[in-house]
Image: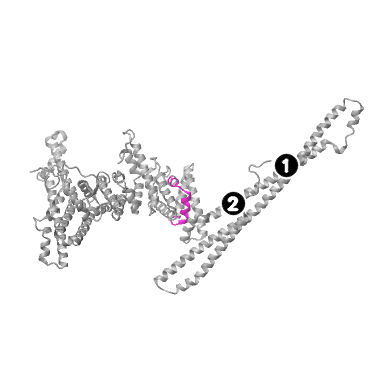
Amino acid sequence: MTLDVGPAPLAGAPGELAGRAHDAARASALLAEARTSLRPVHAGLSAQRGAAVVAAAARLASVDERLHTYATVLDGAATTLRRHATVLAELQAGARQALADRDAALARERHWQAEADEARRSTWNTAALGATALGSTALGATALGSTAPGDDPTGRLMAAEQQLAAARADVVGAEARWRAARDAQSAESRRAAGALGTFADVRAVGVAAAAGMSATQYSGSAAQGRRTAALLSQAVLADEQLDRRSARTALHALLAGQRDDPAFWATFWDEATPQQVYLALGPDPADPGPVDAALRGTLTAGVAHWAQTASPAERRELGHAAVVDVGGAHLGLTLRSELAAALLAGDLPAEVYAGAGDALEQRWAEVAQSGAQGLPTGTNQWPPTGDVLTDATITAPLAAAVLAGYARHPRLALDRLAPADGTGAAARRWLGWVPRDGWPDGGRAVTSALATAVGAGTASDNRSEQTRAALLIAHATKEMPRGLLSGPTLSDAASGRIAEVYEPYLSSVGDAAWTQTIDPCDDTSLKSALDAPPAPGVDTGADASTRAPVVQPELDAFALRDVIAATSRTTGAAEAWLGATDRHTAGMVDLATSGAYDSDAEQRNTLVESTLADVGAVTGSMQAERLDEAYDTVATRETLVSLTGIGMGVGTIGRKVATSSTAAAASTGLGFLDMSAPVAEALTEVSSVKEQTYFRYATTMHDLVVAHDLDVGVPLDQARKGAEAIDPLDEDKHARGSFIPPFTTMSETSHDKECG
């Protein structure tokens, strides 16, 4: 007979296992001795006082806890190995005996098979002789009667077949005993592996030890993590809605109870995938409600626990899977996106967000390409519109989580938002669009990522990295007005981050306003409006490099005006921009009163004048929307008057509208019909702000320069004379001429003006 798997001695080395068990037990004993030796030291410290003593005592307590955990783990491993070695030796002995019995039975089987074959041949010979003798004389009778009783072939055949059957039965029995030993070995190996597997995950053991968990606690947490991961599949594959709901309820309870258990999460994420989490906890026809905040918080904490001990490759893989596993099916996409955002919401290592960012950019590229079907070959529909924008809007929470991750890691933010290619594609990808209802966090994540990227570039001593940051701002300045800032107004926090990113580049703002203008009435004081705005780049001019410590961008002044206007609408947002100009002014005053500027009044005054131009451009931009609103009001009134009184006639649009309009005009003394009133009022208001702002900054800078000269011993008359060119009270000096034109240029709109 043959076996499904050929018989052989069972594998394994019980002696070696016993030796390893002895080593583990010995190591456990040594750790216990170490704990014993630490106790007198700890006791001696307990009677002393002082911060250093307290810190040392806490450290010793921590070491004692870890030694206890490791000793318990080793002792448990020794017990498991010792038992496995004993059982394995017994099973191997039983298997060897079964194989020996099988070999003996096979030998008997061969012997009796030969006997049976010989007896069968003898039977055939006797039958042939009998047939011949019956047809002859008395010789036949003599031949038939001459066979001895002991030589009966039929009897021999029967006896041989009986022995053959017994031998074969013994072979079957021996093989059955061998199989039983083999199966028992497999079962015992699985049991031992399961027991040792609890301790084999060095990462999880380390997490448990750091958390002060005992071996028993750790073993229970690890087993719970595996069971919970298995329950995910049950919740997904359940056939009945009741079974699925029951599994989901159990999952909620299990996960909520393990929020702060690092060993649980280390094991759970070794077994589970984001896709299983989304399918098990995501949308369900029988339970369509959103995932509660507590569960999202639990998932966030769980990934953070896991990431502490995962390898860089594992972290990147999980981040990538968190995005990819969201999938493209519209049903349930919102909840899957929210769950993915929850997985990425913690303070995770950079590799997680690098993987997630790769996957998100790939998703957007694929969605944009699919959205471009029917358009010219190679068209990539980004910034998104239509269905592409719908998908990007639904997954905006996920994108915000990725951007928030970038914001936590400066190097990653610089590499992703300001790559070395400098093409502006990254700025368009992240800043050139906005979800339909705005970013769910008010734009905080995207602006924080931008601020982090710029901060990393400007803080670097590497000029190429400074250039990357400057190019990012140059591209972002063009992209944000038609993208990020074209939706709902950003939160004050997000607007403040925009002000922050421009602060290192305020030295370029005044220059941009001076060299670009849309004023059709004056092409002499400022550059002609016929020149196109500059392409995004870096400013290589000598003035920018001497006034600023970092590489400066080449800015589109009027795109910048739109950026500043859109991010200074509220008091809090405006204060952020004014704070940036205040710090810029203070920095320029420090520069003006040091080094070469301190000994050259002309250079100093030029620096102050340039700074006033910067401030004028920024504060003028903050007033641009006030004038825009006034012009829009005038346009609305002109349209209404045209419809009611001139173009269409009262009867055409309806008496009720015409009557109400006329009544409104009458109630205000026909002021409603005064087309110039809103603009005149706005211009007066902006002009007042312009004067107040000018005197505030010009006076501050002038007085600080004079005060510095007095501090270093310059006589008062001489100090005043050296600062005459920047005296804000002198209408003929350059200070006013430096501030007013940029303010006016940046505060005015593109509405047609009458030139006198």
Would residue 111 appear left or right of 450 to someone viewing this image? right
Image location (x, y in percent) of residue 179: 65, 46
Q: Does the magenta run of residues contain 273?
A: yes
The label on residue 7 is none
What residue is shown with label 2?
A: 189
Residue found at the very far top of the displayed protein: 135
Could you tell me which residue is drawn at 38 percent across and 54 percent down? 347
**Amino acid bearing label 1:** Arg
**Amino acid bearing label 2:** Ser
* Residue 598, picture quadrant: bottom left
The stretch in magenta equals 258-278
Would residue 557 appear left or right of 207 to someone viewing this image? left
Image location (x, y in percent) of residue 273: 45, 47
Mark 2 or mark 1: which comes first in sequence?
A: 1
- Depth order, front residue of 62/542: 542
Camera sees residue 574:
no
Q: Does the magenta run of residues contain 721?
A: no
Label 1 sits on a secondary structure element that is helix
Mainly helix, strand or loop, the magenta region?
A: helix
Quadrant for the N terminus in the image: top right
- Depth order, front residue of 663/615: 615
What residue is shown with label 1?
A: 168
Q: Residues within 10 Å of mark 2 (few under 14, many from 20)?
A: some
Image location (x, y in percent) of residue 238: 49, 43
